[in-house]
Amino acid sequence: MPPRPTSPPQLRGRIFRASHVIRAGLLTRSQLRSRAWLRVFPDVWACASLPLTHELRARAAARLLLPDSVVSGRSAAVLWGAQLAETDDDVELTVSPGFRGGSVPGIRLRRRVLADHDLVVRSGTRVTGRIRTALDLAALHPVDEAVVAVDAFLVATRTPVEEVRTAAASMTGRNCRHVRRVLDLADGLAESPQETRLRLLLGRSGIPRPVAQFGVREGRRFLGRVDFAWPGHKLALEYEGEWHGAPQQVVPDRERLNRLFSAGWRIIFVTKEDLRRPERLLARIRAALAASTFA
């Protein structure tokens, strides 16, 4: 028979070290195994009323399990509001080079020295600052996935890509060229990872470079924004993500498209299936650009 849930008021809605609350007499080990509590890490538990997210796990790791650590990498991005890690992904922490602890399941440790200006405290948790986090994301491999992560982070935090490029210019070390290459490719405009992947595909194709997040106007009238545009050809490229089919999005999206069609714009819609067959997609785009050239 499972233990009867016991929920002391001091622990409701809280994350805690199991050894501490047992020593304090608030819970027994048997009571801790009831459905009232969630195991987050060894000796770190949470009230079951809290949603188990990557953010919760990162805060628990940095504040309770390894209190001298700093949340970094993709986990830092999550604490900044960019959803770049799933709930069960390893929490990324930075510790000092002299850290002597061993590995912990569910945590990825990086040993290095961080400058004071690379650290901030957000809601009581030490985390790498915006620029340091962006640089860490730019160091990911392969290049395209690093650009996807950087774009998502820049959009979520409204960080100008130029600020990060300036910081990268003074970097040294074996990965600095990779970081600068990634930041040259990032633009901080894409509204989804697939938009970034589509932009990178176009950039390598030899097709004239489109304008990202282009606002279409007819005189002083704003008709709508498109993901990519060749204004001189009145041709737009739109990535069809799942959000386009959301009930609250259908009507305004249709109205926007009708305004664009009425103004003579053509739109190529791109799906994730198209990205799996890039040559067919690029052929469609080339044909559409050629048709407008000779119209």
Image (spheres, rainbow, N blue to C red):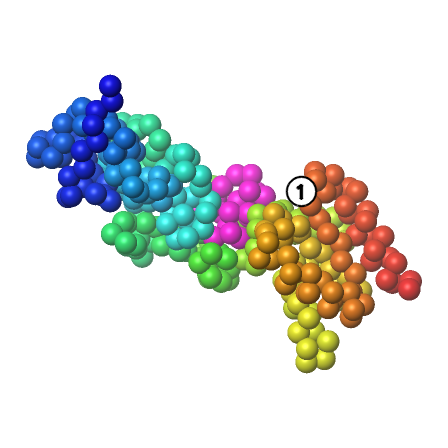
Check residue 240 for magenta coloring.
no
Which residue is at the front of the view, 139 or 20? 20
Q: Residue 235 in the image: x percent, y percent? A: 77, 61
Left or right relative to 130: residue 243: right
Q: Amino acid at mark 1?
A: Lys
Left or right relative to 273: residue 295: right
Check residue 141 for magenta coloring.
yes
Q: Residue 184 in the image: x percent, y percent? A: 57, 54
Left or right relative to 164: residue 191: right
Which residue is at the front of the view, 173 or 71? 71
Q: Residue 223 in the image: x percent, y percent? A: 68, 71
- The answer to whether any part of residue 179 appears in the image is no
Left or right relative to 41: residue 154: right
Residue farthest to the top? 1
Q: Tell me what residue is drawn at x 88 percent, y 58 percent.
A: 291
SS majority, magenta: helix
Q: Quadrant of the N terminus?
A: top left
Q: Residue 146 in the image: x percent, y percent? A: 53, 44
* Vertical comparison of 225 with 183: above or below: below
Circle 1 Cα neighbour tier, 10 Å, few/some/many (<14 / 14–19 / ≥20): few
* Vertical comparison of 243 with 255: above or below: above
- The answer to whether any part of residue 120 appears in the image is yes
Q: Tell me what residue is drawn at x 28 percent, y 54 percent.
A: 123
Q: Quadrant of the C terminus?
A: bottom right
Q: Tell me what residue is drawn at x 47 percent, y 53 percent.
A: 153
Find disc 1 in the rendering and name its residue.
Answer: 272
Q: Range of the magenta residues?
A: 136-153
Label 1 sits on a secondary structure element that is: helix
Q: Tell me what residue is drawn at x 61 percent, y 47 percent.
A: 242
